[in-house]
Image (cartoon, rainbow, N blue to C red):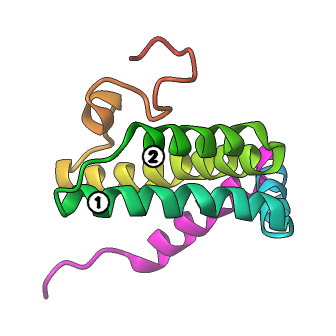
Amino acid sequence: MKPKPNMEEIKAKTEALCQVILDQPAFEELKKMIHNFYADQEAQSIYNNVIELQEFLEQKQRHGIEITREEIEELDEAREAVYTHPVSRDFLYANREFDKVKDWVTQSVIKTIELGRIPDEEDLFGGRCACGGSCGCGGH
């Protein structure tokens, strides 16, 4: 008989990890930030404006069309509007925080399977932590 992982145990431990994530004090507040964004038409409009401008300028670049200084300034102003609007700024922050958790968990599982051991930070992120440089941990 060929070896098989104990999927029941893996499932149980995965559910335990999921519960730890849900039990984080910040989890509900981060979810609320995302919910607030979807309830705020102004925040969505400001955010969508940036996305549309970025896509338009990227399309121009792909077609070899020069981007004007005015277009760059328009994009900069649109980005600034996202960061000065508290609901859209919180939405971006919450998404970054959730992405950190997802990246950490995903990379940890993948590297564990690849390496056959629990990975350390060097294995996961080349010696840098998963925070992207904003945690002050000194691992950057």
The x and y percentages for residue 125 are 31, 34
Q: Secondary structure at mark 1?
A: helix
Mark number displayed over residue 37:
none
Q: Nearer the viewer, residue 32 or 85?
A: 85
The answer to whether residue 54 is above or below residue 25 is below
The x and y percentages for residue 89 are 72, 43
- Residue in view at x 25 percent, y 79 percent: 4
Q: Secondary structure at mark 2?
A: helix
Q: Is residue 61 left or right of residue 13?
A: left
The answer to whether residue 7 is above or below residue 77 is below
- Say what amino acid the circle numbered 1 marks: Lys
- Say what amino acid the circle numbered 2 marks: Glu
Give the residues in magenta: 1-27
Q: Earlier in the sequence, mark 1 or mark 2?
A: 1
Q: Is residue 30 left or right of residue 40?
A: left
Q: Nearer the viewer, residue 134 or 14?
A: 134
Q: For mark 1, does the 10 Å Cα neighbourhood hold few (<14), some (14 to 19), or many (20 or more) residues?
A: few
- Residue in view at x 62 percent, y 63 percent: 48
How many numbered discs, if any? Answer: 2
List the residue tagged with mark 2.
71
Mark number displayed over residue 60:
1
